[in-house]
Image: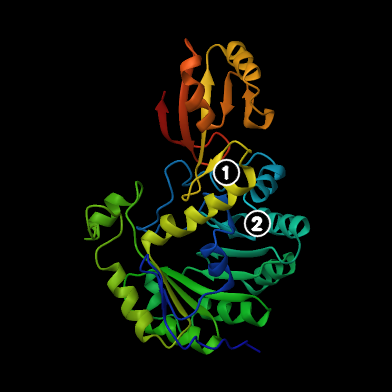
Amino acid sequence: MARKKTRSRKLEEDFTGSLSNYMSKGCRLCHKGGKLVLFVTGVCNRYCFYCPVSTERKGADHVYANERRVESEEDVIGQARRMGALGTGITGGEPLMRLDRTLHYIKLLKQTFGKRHHIHLYTCTVPSDETLKKLKDAGLDEIRMHPSKDVWDHFYGSAYHHALKKAIELGMDAGIEIPALASVPEIERAVAEAGAFLNLNELEFSETNCEAMKKQGYGRKDDVSNAVQGSEKVAREIVLNSIANTRYCSSRFKDAVQLRERLKRTASNVARPFDEVTGDGTIVCGEITGDLDGALKLIADMEIPADMYLREGDVLAIAWWILDEIKDDLPGTGKSIVERYPLKDGLVVERIPL
C-alpha cells in the first residue's frame, strides 16, 4: 500500500525565494548542509539540453565526494566525516548506469554510519522493479526520478509513474525532480495520488549548457544571477496552486544555504585551534613562508602557545591576529592572512599580504 503523506497546511518561504508546502527528509538535511554529495559517474544515456554537469565531469566515469576526486573508499568516508554528514545524496551522470558501484557505496555508507545516515538518489532512467528492490535492500531511503520533458504531459500511467508507486510500495520515499520549465498537471496528479513529492528546481545557465539554452530561447533573469528568466515564475505558480507535496528550490538557495551550511559544518569539524571560522563557512589563518626557522625561534622567544601555530611543509600556519601583532618582527619573511574553503587544498578566497 502506498503511504499517503499529508500536505503541510501552510506554505513556507525562505530568504532565497525557495517555496514549499512539503519537504522530503533529503531536502530537510540538504537545508542544514548535512548531505555529502556523491557523484558516482559522469556517464549518462540522456542528453538534456539544460544539463549543468561540468566539462570535467560530463561523460567521465569518475567518482567525486563533494569537490574531491575519489580514489578509494576512504576518500568517501573521510569526506563524510570531515563535514559530519547526516546523509548522502547520490548523483551523476546517471547512477543507475553504474548500478553495482552505486549499490556498493550505499551499503558502505550504511555500514559505516548506520541506518540513520539518510541516502537519497537521483535517476533519469525508469528503474525496474528488480533494480528498485536492490536499491531498497542496499539501504536507499529516498529516490528522485527525473523524467525527460517529452514524458511530462503523459506522465500519468507511464513507466515512471509505475516506478514511483513501486518505490513507495517497497518502503522508500519517492518523488519527481525536474527543472521548472512548464506546468505539469499530469505529474502533480500522479504524485498526489501516490503520496510522493514533486521538487522543482530553478533552471540555471552553466558553462556546459549555455549554448544549448540560448538555442532554446532562454535568457538570464538578471545580470547577477545564472538563473533563467521565467523559471521562478513557473515554479511559484505550480507550488502556490499544487494539489501535491511540492517544493521549489531557487538558484540562490544552492549557494546561499546548501553550500554555505555544508562548508560551515565542515569548518567546525576541521578547524584548528588557531583558525577562525567565518559566517560563510570559510577558514581564516595567518601564513608565514621563507625563513621558518627564524620565525619559529621568534615564536618560541615570545612564548606563543604551541596550539596557536603549526608547521606544514614550507608553510607555518598561525593565528592571524598573532601574526598581525608580530609581523614587524619577521623581516625577510612572507606573511599573509589567508581565507580559504575548509577542504583539502581548499580554494583560496582571499589572501592579504602583510
Residue 147 x/y as whole percent: 45, 70
Q: Nearer the viewer, residue 191 or 290?
A: 290
Q: In the rendered structure, which amino acid carries the disc numbered 1?
A: His
Left or right, residue 174 beside residue 204: right
Left or right, residue 8 beside residue 120: left
User: How far apart, in angstroms, are the residues tagged by discs 1 and 2?
Assistant: 12 Å
Looking at the figure, which quarter contains the C terminus? top left
From the image, tell me which residue sits under label 2.
102
Residue lying at 60% horizontally and 65% vertically, measured from the top left: 120
Q: Is residue 127 visible?
A: no
Color encoding of the figure = rainbow
Q: Residues within 10 Å of mark 2 (few under 14, many from 20)?
A: many
Task: Work out whether 19 lies above or below 221.
Answer: below
Residue lying at 64% horizontally and 16% vertically, measured from the top left: 301
Q: Nearer the viewer, residue 258 or 2?
A: 258
First in sequence: mark 1 vs mark 2? 1
Q: Nearer the viewer, residue 339 or 30?
A: 339
Residue 202 placement: quadrant: bottom left
Q: Which circle marks residue 308 in the picture? A: none
From the image, tell me which residue sits under label 1.
62
Residue lying at 51% horizontally and 78% vertically, measured from the top left: 197
Residue 10 placement: quadrant: bottom left
Task: Work out whether 311 lies above or below 42.
Answer: above
